[in-house]
Amino acid sequence: MTRVEVQQRCLEIDIGGPCADLNIAFSPSSVRIYESAGMETEIPLRDIDKVRVRPRAEDSLIEVIDLAAATLPRLEVADPAGGLVMYGATGSVQLERQTPKALILKGSSPDEIAQEDARISEFHSEIQRPKSWFERAQAAFLRFVGRDSKLGFYSWAEFGENVMQLCEGRTLGGLIARFLVKRRQADIDRQDLEKIKQVLQPGDILLRYQKGFPLDPFFVGIWQHAGACVDSKATIVDALSEGVGRRSLERFAHADAVVVLRPYFWGDQKSEFLNYLQLQVGKAYNYNFNSRTVEHYCSGLVYHALAHAGMAPKTNELIHPDRLLSLPGLAVVWTNRADLVSEVLPKSEQKRAA
């Protein structure tokens, strides 16, 4: 359990227990501490001159966010073995021991963070822990049956398409599947893509639906994948089996239905939301579907970004894409399947999909 207390104007943060990731966010008046297990606390800056962080778990990831704090207290981090990410106010940070697992960025705006995309992605790739044979087998299986690799099991040809994508054309089975398969046409067409591009703005959240998953309503939900737009070029950040990355809208929207949600941002919330998403690029896929932030699954990534921006409560529960559609403070701005939106939203909220 993480311990947080103030002693002689020093905020002491001891990260206790394994599998604990920490997010420290500074604002002009306070510092907010979030733990992946669900702990959340806020301390007024007027009460502290220094923040000292001691990670006790070897794989704990620490993310320090300066939200344009007027007077940032001195920050000391003791050997962040699991990794340290920080942006803004770099002059006030001291590492007790230099470690290669630290990424400290000078910029603090979404555009400045976006320019560091290569460094961020490389850093997260370097700190990923090795996968066991069981985790690698699990990843291969989920990639085979997952929504990011195919569009349903309506025919043997589509089953063969999955074999092809799993083998990536490098084996005899993959070559045979590539010869036999004719890809099914998705319901989202070019006209729909143009309509999405016309309404899409940075900060918008997208959900997609694909046919051919009769069990999904019982285990996943109606909407099966989530991502968010991070720039004016319609770039989507999402978590697929290969990890968190930037994708084109065309790739994300190769589906049968898409819904675009627009959060009602206030103040710095939009910048916080976009910064958080862009700082996750390069992280691995979370095949355990837990609340850890060192890895992400699709809807968990978007929910963590909303929670970081103060638009959703912190939780260690599993977040399905349907839950994003039901969150307060989000409006439906476009969809080609209002009937699917209505299946998720309470009757009192169905007017949002009109």
Image (cartoon, helix red, strand yellow):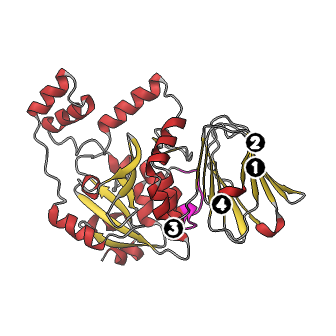
- Give the residue number, with chain letter if any, for mark 3: 271
The numbered dot on residue 96 is 2
Give the image quarter of residue 45. bottom right
- Disc 3 and disc 2: Cα gap in Å? 30 Å
Look at the image and give the residue range highlighted in magenta: 307-317
* Vertical order, 181 against 306 (above or below): above
Quadrant of image for the C terminus: bottom left
- Give the residue number, with chain letter if any, for mark 1: 76
Disc 3 crowd rating (10 Å Cα; few below 14, some 14-19, many 20+) is many
Write the residue at 60% across / 58% down. Answer: 314
Contact (CB < 8 A) between labels 1 and 2? yes
Give the mark, 3 or 2, whose residue is nearer the N terminus. Answer: 2
Q: In the rendering, at what x and y percent does residue 302 appear?
A: 46, 57
The numbered dot on residue 89 is 4
* Vertical order, 314 against 287 (above or below): below
- The local secondary structure at tag 2 comes to loop
